[in-house]
Amino acid sequence: MNYQQQYDQYLARAKRALEEACRLYLPAESQVCQAARYSLMGGGKRVRAVLVLSVCEMLGGDGAAAEAFAAAVEMLHCYSLIHDDLPCMD
């Protein structure tokens, strides 16, 4: 398997993990939940999640067990991007 195929495989797993996290933690159809889902699922390279999954497997860990951690890393990154864009309000 070449690099691009491996990356695409990890990317698909990361996307599924994010979709599952959204289903579990953002189930409501409120505007806040919709905005959070939009921000999380809006695309991106998901490099951080791919790194979590690939390093876990490289070190002999259970890649399936790392999927929730990969989703959490992406959620934190998404939060940091949104928070950084907010104007200073003090």
Image (cartoon, rainbow, N blue to C red):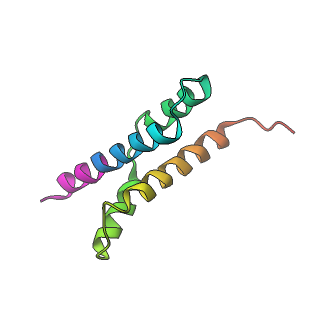
Relative placement, left or right, of 77 versus 56 is right
Place of residue 70 in the rendered image (x, y in percent of width and height, measured from the top left): 42, 56
Res 31 visible: yes
Q: Position of residue 18 (x, y in %)?
A: 41, 44
Which SS type dominates the magenta stretch? Answer: helix
| Residue 31 figure quarter | top right
Give the percent coordinates (x, y) of residue 75: 52, 47
Q: Nearer the viewer, residue 79 or 88?
A: 79
Q: Nearer the viewer, residue 8 or 35?
A: 35
**Quadrant into which the N terminus falls:** bottom left
Q: Quadrant of the C terminus?
A: top right
Residue positioned 21% across, 56% down in the render: 6
Query: Is residue 44 depicted above or below 27 in this figure?
Result: below
Q: Is residue 48 visible?
A: no
The image quadrant of residue 81 is top right
Residue 40 inside the magenta-drawn segment: no
Vertical relation: 24 (above or below) 47: above
| Relative horizontal placement of residue 77, taking residue 20 as reference (left or right) | right
Residue for point 24% across, 48% down: 8
Q: Is residue 47 above or below residue 41?
A: below
Magenta range is 1-11
Q: Is residue 69 left or right of residue 3?
A: right
Q: Report the residue that reaches farthest toward the right.
A: 90
* Front residue of 27 and 49: 27
Residue at the limit of the structure toward the bottom, as seen here: 59
Relative to residue 30, is residue 1 depicted above or below? below
Which residue is drawn at the image coordinates 38% and 45% (left, top)?
Answer: 45
Q: Is residue 9 magenta?
A: yes
